Amino acid sequence: MRKLWALLLAVASVPASAAELTVSAASSLTESFGEIASAYEKANPGTKVDLNFAASGVLLQQIARGAPVDVLATADQATMAQAQTDGLVDPATQHVFAANSLWVVVPPQTTNKPATLAALAAPGVKRVAIGNPDSVPVGRYARGALQAAGIWPAVQAKMISTQNVRQSLDYVARGEVDAGFVYSTDAQAMRDRVQRAFQVPVAGGINYPLAMVKDSRNAVEAKRFIAFVQSAQGQAILHRHGFGSP
């Protein structure tokens, strides 16, 4: 986190130009936004896109503390709504650009995969990786589903709290937990190192919004990047990485 903050502050010390853009995006967008940034730079010669990935709540905190960010992309609408309430983003530029789904994944060596949420409360399951619900959207989705199923207290007692969805995915891949809650796109990104157990229904679905930060030093470039993410080319990249259409 300190390194990321130092990077953002370093970017702030560089004079702004029409070719510079800093995008803060949810951890689950790592591969897709990496490809989108490369495609955007190719389509706009001379443009440099700096990417900063973290849990959506952490990104919001960074912007609130003055991090020099031009575009914010979150893994839930609640965090974006908070950004609007706090006056950190321009609501006129907000758009939902992708959809995802919630899955429980298990280590590759698992032979008896759980098939339901109730199975996670069974004695055989000792540790479950869940993003911190206070700052990580996937954790809030998981907690909501477990609360709806009436087993949140039982699973919470086994919870290994993580800083972002990729940490949960990594714990599962290394066999340090018995199961973990991740997005479908994360399971796809590491399909050779984790097994999908079952999909978890989420009330209202999982939608990803993005918007221009009000203090953006380059509003024109920020709006152009947002439009690119929504374009046919941007959407094709997202679909290749497992995201659904908004």
Image: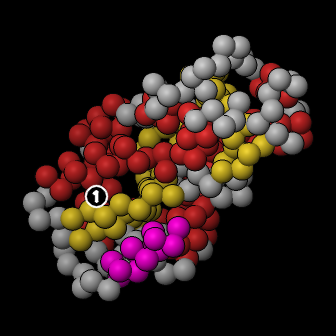
- Residue 90 visible in the picture: no
Q: Quadrant of residue 210?
A: bottom left
Q: Which residue is mark 1?
A: 225
Q: Is residue 58 left or right of residue 162?
A: left
Residue 190 locus on image (x, y percent): 46, 32
- Is residue 226 positioned above or below 22 on the image? above
Q: How is the image coloured?
A: secondary structure
Q: Quadrant of the C terminus?
A: top left
- Residue 243 visible in the picture: yes
Q: Main SS of the magenta segment?
A: helix
| Along the viewing direction, whichever of 69 and 83 lies nearer the viewer | 69
Residue 242 locus on image (x, y percent): 42, 31
Q: Is residue 157 left or right of residue 55?
A: right
Q: Quadrant of residue 45?
A: bottom left
Whether 4 is among the magenta residues is: yes
**Picture residue at 45% right of the left edge, 25% below the top:** 192
Q: Which residues are magenta?
A: 1-12
- Is residue 193 positioned above or below 55 on the image? above
| Along the viewing direction, whichever of 215 and 153 lies nearer the viewer | 153
**Picture residue at 40% right of the left edge, 74% below the top:** 8
**Picture residue at 49% right of the left edge, 36% below the top:** 186
Q: Is residue 116 left or right of residue 96?
A: right
Residue 176 locus on image (x, y percent): 66, 37
- Is residue 169 positioned above or below 81 on the image? above
Number of callouts: 1
Whether 137 is among the magenta residues is: no
> From this viewpoint, which residue is outermost toward the left?
45
Residue 58 locus on image (x, y percent): 58, 64
**Picture residue at 20% right of the left edge, 78% below the top:** 17
**Amino acid on which disc 1 is placed:** Phe
